[in-house]
Image (cartoon, rainbow, N blue to C red):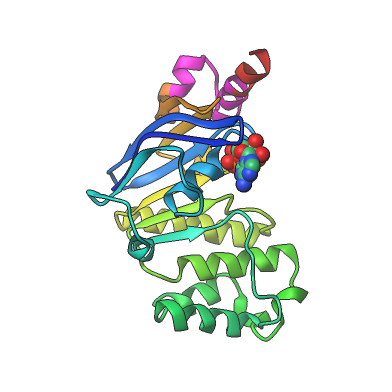
Amino acid sequence: MIEFKDIEKSFGRQAVLSGINLKFDQPGIFAILGPNGSGKTTLIKSLMGMVFPSAGEIWIDGRLKKGNEYRNSIAYLPQIARFPENLSVSEFLSFIENIRGQGSRKEELSVVFGLNDFKDKKLRTLSGGMRQKVNLVSALMYDTHTIILDEPTIGLDPIALINLKNWIRKEKEAGKTILLTTHIMDIVQELADEIVFILEGKVYYRGSQEELLSQTQTENTEQAIAQLLSLQKAS
Ligand SMILES: Nc1ncnc2c1ncn2[C@@H]1O[C@H](COP(=O)(O)OP(=O)(O)OP(=O)(O)O)[C@@H](O)[C@H]1O
């Protein structure tokens, strides 16, 4: 269970989050959407202890978030992975395991994303899509109840994309709570049980895709989100 209570965050004079209240206490796939710069990554980083909210509380599994222990109960895929570039792929994964313990799903995920084909390559020599595959394996190799994916599909080829979607679906069926951000509306349409749309620092909409289509009187998720996005331009 994750709960954001009255979260506010400003960077200098720029208010990014202005009273976010969100609770995720059911299994499912929740798409956090909003225009560029609307604060999606800032919200996720607040949860992961990488950004300190100016006000508000975050509760995890019924406890007020403090310290760093809770991070082991969350699989987190950052939007931009910062790797120790001189390590090879397999050295990097072992490096993480030395800190966090054995990744119970490392082997399975390495097959799913074809990592074994380039496991001896240095991280600095990888293509964008290869880096994202390493990012995915390093984030998902621990069997946690909560999974946070910040733009998980960036750079992936169609096969990796299908494999990722299948993995996410399987995790949901196993009863996990998955929060993801993406600008790819096909992914949202295919996967999301609920949409959370953030606009001007607030939760502008939260609900199912069906409700969103009916409220916006649109035919698909892409059109519905485009309509919500146009609200910002209008304001
Ligand atoms: N460390 C920081 N210092 C100053 N401003 C920041 C910092 N991090 C984020 N911001 C600003 O906060 C706002 C929200 O950024 P954030 O990355 O959360 O947006 P986002 O919704 O994830 O965007 P995108 O869809 O483009 O990934 C932006 O205006 C950004 O410039």
Q: Which residues are magenta?
A: 212-228
Picture residue at 40% right of the left edge, 38% below the top:
193
Query: Residue drawn at (48%, 40%), measured in percent from left and top?
Result: 31
Q: Quadrant of residue 163?
A: bottom right
Q: Residue at x 39, y 80 (%)?
A: 101
Quarter containing the C terminus: top right
Residue 28 visible from this viewpoint: yes
Q: So how many labels did they put on this image?
A: 0
Magenta portion: prevailing SS class? helix
At horizontal 46% and vertical 23% (from top left) the residue drawn is 212
Q: Nearer the viewer, residue 144 or 202?
A: 202
Residue 189 pos. (x, y %) = 52, 37
227 inside magenta stretch: yes
Left or right for 30, reference 51: left
Up-down: is 170 above or below 232?
below
Looking at the image, residue 59 lies above or below residue 122: above
- In the displayed structure, does residue 64 sit left or right of residue 99? left
Most extreme residue toward the left is 62
Q: Quadrant of residue 29?
A: top left
Q: Nearer the viewer, residue 156 or 50?
A: 50
Q: Is residue 82 left or right of residue 192?
A: right
> Where does the image place residue 87, in percent across and percent down from the top left?
66, 82
Up/down of 198 relative to 125, above or below: above
Q: In the rendered image of this protein, does residue 182 appear above or below residue 49?
A: above
Residue 219 lies within the magenta run: yes
- Percent x, y for residue 227? 60, 19
Ligand 1 in which quarter: top right
In the figure, is residue 45 to the left or right of 178? right
